[in-house]
Image (cartoon, rainbow, N blue to C red):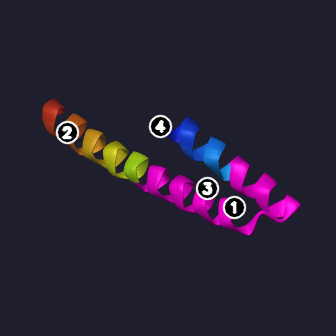
Amino acid sequence: MLRWAIAFLIIALIAAVFGFGGIAAAATDIARILFLVFLVLFVISLVFGLMRRS
């Protein structure tokens, strides 16, 4: 999932350089959402992993 977030971030940067404002904004939003989902899943797995060891 982190790969998808990075891919959309790169697409957003390339679109911004070429002046495609709408595409850049959409790709940035998608990258931000995917990164937040990845971060939440990471924290959840970290908590469950610590609880499992105890």
The type of residue carrying mark 2 is Phe
| Percent of width and height locating residue 18 | 87, 59
Element at label 1? helix
Task: State the residue in front, 23 or 33.
Answer: 23
Q: CA distance from mark 2 to mark 1?
A: 36 Å
Residue at (55% x, 53% y) in the render: 31
Lower sequence index among marks 4 and 1: 4
* Image quadrant occupied by the C terminus: top left
Q: CA distance from mark 2 to mark 3?
A: 32 Å
| Percent of width and height locating residue 1 | 47, 37
Name the image quarter holding residue 50.
top left
Task: State the residue in front, 1 or 12.
Answer: 12
Name the residue beneath numbered marker 4.
1
Lower sequence index among marks 3 and 4: 4
Name the residue beneath numbered marker 2.
48
Task: State the residue in front, 41 or 15.
Answer: 15
Q: CA distance from mark 3 to mark 1?
A: 5 Å
Residue at (64% x, 42% y) in the render: 7
